Amino acid sequence: MHAAKMEMVKNDFKHNAALTRPTGFINDQNNSKWKNWKFGLSTIYDSGCGVIAMYNFLRDTGNNPDFATLIALTQLCNADLAYGIFGANPVPEEYLQLLALEAMIVFDLIIYPIAAALVPAVAAVIVANYIAEQPWWMQIILGLNYVAAVAATTAVIEAALFTAVVTANVFIANYFDDLHDIADVLGLFKLNNIYSTISYSSFNNHLSGYRYSIISFWNGVGSNGLIDFSQGAHTVYVKRYYQTNEFVDYNNGNSCLSPQSQFYKIITSNQSDVNKLFISGLVIKG
Amino acid sequence: MIKRTLILSIIIFTFFLSSCVGIGFNNICKANTAWASADNRLVFQMQGHNASDGFGRIEINGEAVAVTATLDHVAQKLALCMRSGEKTKELILFKISLYGEGFKKEEDRIKVTMIINNSDDDSYDGSFALYRRDLRAEEIDAKHYANTAWVNGEFGMQLLPDAISDFTKILRRTIKYREINLTIAFHFLDDREFEVYAAEELVLAGTYETEDLEMILHFTVNEIYDVNTLTLSVMTDH
């Protein structure tokens, strides 16, 4: 897998380095020209908000990154999710482990008991359908051994499931063990004093007094008041103006300054939804 | 091991849903379309190659105000900007959401909800629907291609928009052709006519036709080229 990814990174870099470099801040990910910029199995147009947020921050702080190089660094750090398809990872590694723990509780109490109970039923349906399609004399023979046939089918399904799970587990475990995040990429630019959190209130507490941040958030809640994952998520670079204490967000469809009291407008129009929608925040204490 | 794999699969699934563009949002931006509110107080068109940048008008306290419209399907925002001197300033910022159930979303109707309103008109606070239609062929005009640059490499003409070109309908840049090296201003006039000035002197004028991503100039005044027509192409990587 490593060799394949290296080949992909090299090909992407060769392609991207030949394109016209962006000048100024990148504020237009929705422009179709970004379809030309490769990001693994995706493009900057579809999944590049995280890389763009890093680029805008680095450009604003005088690091003058080359965009093609920044994309390659994101890939080489394994901060790209599923080879770029899902963008750059905004969630710090320690919180991924926490998420895994929460998911384990959900799995133990709900998903696993249901799955375990369903396998024999599924096997019974398969066997019954199989028997129904056989000639009459075969149906009699199989009918006499129905219980054994269901048990055998259950065993086959469980064995196949186990094999698939083991194979997937090796791949996924390796992938997640190596997964990094945006803060790791910024660390390559000697920006190591970064505070990461998945709590909006904690983020806000750490924000005061500092100028640069990168935030990730879900795009909307559904009519049931829960996060609507189908609306996707977004990552943006946000800068504070010290004199006015206002914030400006880049690549977020906006050119207005938001006062601190209305910081939530960078994320959503409804203040009460902010805590739900917030995914993660980096405060760069440079 | 089975548990761990399933847990990680859930996490991966969560991230699958976290890519930048929400389901259905890719389909709302379409070139050569017009958007309008039901009462026609807000209308704008997306012409040319860029499906996200357009130009139109909004009624503010009974008065029509020219605006640029940026329909950002990634950030899920609609930003309306008005001219302010030699710059633009944001007038209203809306959040976009889609109509439809589950994965089946409407493409020709969106809901906009006010986030920031810098106008004096509070009638846009809250939410309302915008409706999309395809433009007719006769409505498509290079003059209305928002935020668009044009080029003809053979004849050395390049036209770039500035911050207020969508309002002034003037593009500036250069003609570099043989021994000629001019800084020019290309003016779109009414009735598909144009004039090109170099140091306030008229050097080219005539009519133009719009054919998709090309603009064909027919000269009635021509102080530069030894041809009667010249074709400019949209710079798609601008």
Image (cartoon, coloured by chain):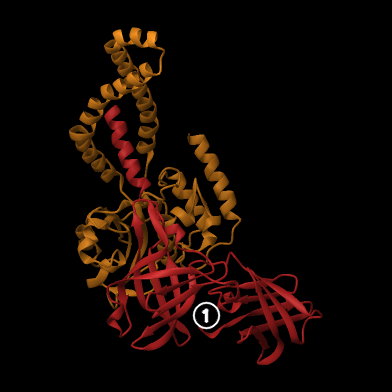
B114 is higher (above) or lower (below) than A136: below
Residue at horizontal 74 percent and vertical 76 percent from the top:
B230
Between A211 and B116, the one nearer to me in the picture? B116
Between A14 and A270, the one nearer to me in the picture? A270
The answer to whether residue B22 is seen in the rendering is no
Residue at horizontal 31 percent and vertical 75 percent from the top:
B116
Judge left or right: residue B121 versus residue A205.
Answer: right
Which residue is outermost to the front? A136
Identify the element where label 1 is drawn.
Answer: helix
Residue type marked 1: Asp
Image colour for chain A is: orange
Residue A130 placed where, x, y %? 38, 18
A91 is higher (above) or lower (below) than A6: below
Image colour for chain B is: red
Residue B38 placed where, x, y %? 38, 75
Q: Which residue is mark 1?
A: B166
Residue B165 placed where, x, y %? 54, 81
Residue B43 placed where, x, y %? 44, 77
